[in-house]
């Protein structure tokens, strides 16, 4: 299965001319001279960027997990520090961070790179961090049917750091727990392994 970098948002591609027009209009409305050398190609560059950063709309996150393998491993599997970039749906400002996924299989495992692709397919769209966390956990539970899943997502939100309350460096942490991870000892084991 191809990585998200191989996808482009085809709705953006189809609407390239309109998006470029509207970006140019926004530049005018904020007081810029759209004929200035540095801005001449900005509408086209923004449109190409949108094709990439909103590529998640082209992927079904369930299919991104791809082929699963029958494996009788029933111990904790963790993929941590999966870097993601997303766009806040409230301000269209970037937010970014790391996702950590742990699960205890019950007969099916996914290729480890598929977990990173799952994160990309969910984050490369307009999002909120809470939804990202829940969607990762729910899709893992639905597709792999593990004994349990735990997802922790850390994020730094430019809508909070660069505007509004202006608190750079502040991080938001969200978690989702499914199945056997409701057991506090297992949850503690997962969280302690994240710190290593």
Image (cartoon, grey):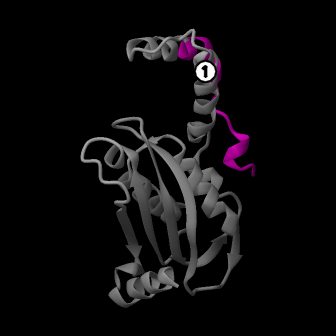
Query: Measured from the top left, where is residue 168 in percent x and y?
Result: 36, 54
**Residue 6 is covered by the magenta coloring:** yes
Residue ranking furthest to the bottom: 185
The relative height of residue 46 versus residue 98 in the rendered view (above or below) is above
Quarter of image, res 44: top right
Q: Is residue 87 left or right of residue 66?
A: left
Q: Main secondary structure of the magenta part?
A: helix
Quarter of image, res 69: bottom right
Query: Measured from the top left, where is residue 117 in percent x and y?
Result: 63, 55
Stretch in magenta: 1-20
Q: Which residue is more in the foreground, 55 or 155? A: 155
Q: Which residue is more in the foreground, 32 or 70? A: 32
Q: Is residue 117 left or right of residue 192?
A: right
The relative height of residue 21 versus residue 138 in the rendered view (above or below) is above
Residue ranking furthest to the front: 37
Residue ranking furthest to the left: 165
Do we see residue 105 in this rendering? no
Q: Secondary structure at mark 1?
A: helix
Residue depicted at 32% across the width and 48% down the height: 160
Q: Which residue is more in the foreground, 14 or 138? A: 14
Instruction: Identify the residue position indicated by label 1 in the image.
Output: 38
**Residue 71 is covered by the magenta coloring:** no
Do we see residue 145 in this rendering? yes
Q: Is residue 193 left or right of residue 110?
A: left
Residue depicted at 35% across the width and 35% down the height: 91
Residue depicted at 52% across the width and 76% down the height: 103
Category of crowding for the residue at label 1, using alpha-carbon neighbours closer than 10 angstroms: few (below 14), some (14–19), many (at least 20): few
Query: Measured from the top left, where is residue 110 in percent x and y?
Result: 66, 68
Query: Measured from the top left, where is residue 88 in percent x and y?
Result: 40, 42
The relative height of residue 63 versus residue 171 in the rendered view (above or below) is above
Residue depicted at 39% across the width and 86% down the height: 188
Quarter of image, res 10: top right
């Amino acid at each position: 299965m191809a990585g998200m970098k191989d996808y482009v948002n085809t709705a953006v591609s189809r609407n390239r001319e309109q998006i470029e027009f509207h970006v140019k209009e926004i530049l005018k409305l904020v007081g810029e001279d759209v004929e200035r050398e540095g801005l001449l190609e900005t509408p086209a560059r923004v449109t190409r960027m949108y094709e990439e950063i909103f590529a998640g709309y082209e992927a079904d996150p369930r299919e991104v997990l791809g082929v699963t393998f029958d494996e009788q491993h029933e111990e904790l599997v963790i993929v941590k520090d999966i870097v993601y970039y997303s766009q806040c749906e409230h301000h269209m400002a970037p937010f970014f961070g790391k996702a950590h996924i742990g699960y205890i299989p019950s007969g099916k495992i996914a290729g480890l790179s598929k977990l990173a692709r799952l994160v990309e397919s969910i984050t490369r769209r307009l999002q909120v961090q809470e939804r990202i966390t829940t969607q990762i956990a729910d899709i893992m539970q639905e597709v792999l049917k593990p004994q349990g899943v735990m997802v922790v997502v850390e994020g730094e939100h430019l809508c909070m750091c660069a505007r509004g309350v202006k608190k750079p460096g502040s991080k938001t942490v969200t978690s989702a727990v499914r199945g056997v991870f409701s057991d506090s000892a297992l949850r503690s084991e997962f969280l302690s392994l994240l710190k290593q």
